[in-house]
Image (cartoon, grey):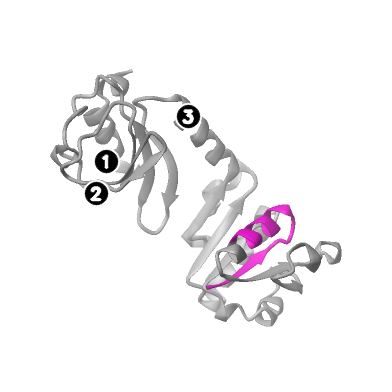
């Protein structure tokens, strides 16, 4: 997979290293000459260019990229880069970094953003996930599918503790995707009972989230 990353700062370089380790081809783009430091990510391609300029993106051959990641520290740049990548070059997947939470509402398909990544939201979700039992925590939003990745740690008083997960009457547009237990990841088996303390990960529509929590953790839902 070929991935272009706009923004060769610490965030962009870190993403590039991870992608390269996983076998992907990476192009780092930055308009600041002092940010172009190929020795820091020697296996990546580098381009000194402004990702908000159409001519720069043509030089980067964005039409050959599978993914474009707008990872600069400027939300305006990330939005424009995503929009150009999607509308002018038909890039299949775009990811936009949200630097300021107040701007998160802009990072949608209307601006060419398939997935937005907001550090404050992710950190908040991880804190909630770490301390909340019985509360449904939204970890990630899938913009194109109108669905969220949500987590619920099953409380001991749940009516489904000890019952096979296949017997749980899940709401419409909701699916159990994995069970985390004692540091292990389990693929859901209809015959497998769920236990108190299990971390259950679901893909669910926003409309089904309240029903899901009421089903599995009715006491927490009432609080």
Q: Residue at 56% of width from left, 69% of height from top?
A: 23
| Placement of 155 over or under 173, stated as above or below | above
**Residue 3 lies in the magenta-colored region:** yes
Task: Specify which label sits upstream in the sequence, 3 or 2.
Answer: 3
Residue 115 is situated, as x and y percent measured from the top left of the image, at: 49, 56
Q: Residues within 10 Å of mark 3 (few under 14, many from 20)?
A: few
* Nearer-the-camera pick, 65 or 56: 65
In the displayed structure, does residue 154 sit left or right of residue 172?
right
Identify the residue position indicated by label 3 in the image. Answer: 130
In the displayed structure, does residue 84 sit left or right of residue 48?
left
Query: Which disc, if any, is residue 155?
Result: none
Quadrant location of residue 79?
bottom right
Classify mark 3: helix, strand or loop.
helix
How far apart marks 3 and 2 lie (CA) works out to 26 Å
Identify the residue position indicated by label 2 in the image. Answer: 173
Q: Residue at 42% of width from left, 39% of height from top?
A: 138
Task: Specify which label sits upstream in the sequence, 1 or 2.
Answer: 2
* Nearer-the-camera pick, 29 or 210: 29
Identify the residue position indicated by label 1 in the image. Answer: 208
Q: Nearer the viewer, mark 3 or mark 1?
A: 3
Q: Residues within 10 Å of mark 1 (few under 14, many from 20)?
A: some
Task: Specify which label sits upstream in the sequence, 3 or 1.
Answer: 3
Classify mark 2: helix, strand or loop.
loop
Classify mark 1: helix, strand or loop.
helix
Labels 1 and 2 touching (C-beta < 8 A)? yes
What segment is highlighted magenta in the picture? 1-18
| Placement of 77 over or under 163, stated as above or below | below
Q: Quadrant of the C terminus?
A: top left
Quadrant location of residue 25?
bottom right
């Amino acid at each position: 997979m070929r991935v272009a990353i706009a923004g060769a700062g610490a965030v962009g370089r870190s993403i590039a290293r991870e992608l390269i380790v996983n076998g992907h081809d990476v192009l780092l783009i930055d308009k600041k000459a002092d940010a172009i430091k190929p020795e820091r990510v020697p296996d990546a391609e580098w381009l000194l260019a402004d990702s908000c300029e159409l001519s720069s993106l043509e030089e980067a051959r964005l039409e050959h990229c599978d993914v474009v990641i707008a990872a600069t520290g400027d939300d305006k740049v990330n939005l424009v880069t995503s929009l150009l990548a999607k509308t002018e070059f038909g890039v299949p997947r775009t990811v936009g970094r949200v630097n300021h939470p107040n701007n998160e509402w802009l990072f949608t398909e209307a601006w060419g953003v398939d997935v937005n990544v907001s550090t404050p939201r992710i950190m908040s979700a991880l804190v909630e996930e770490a301390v909340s039992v019985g509360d449904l925590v939204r970890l990630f939003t899938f913009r194109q599918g109108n669905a969220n990745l949500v987590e619920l740690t099953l409380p001991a008083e749940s009516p489904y503790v000890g019952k096979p997960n296949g017997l749980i009457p899940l709401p419409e547009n909701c699916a159990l995707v994995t069970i985390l237990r004692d540091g292990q990841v389990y693929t859901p088996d209809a015959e497998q009972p769920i236990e108190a303390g299990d971390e259950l990960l679901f893909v669910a529509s926003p409309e089904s989230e309240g029903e899901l929590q009421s089903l599995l953790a009715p006491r927490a839902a009432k609080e």
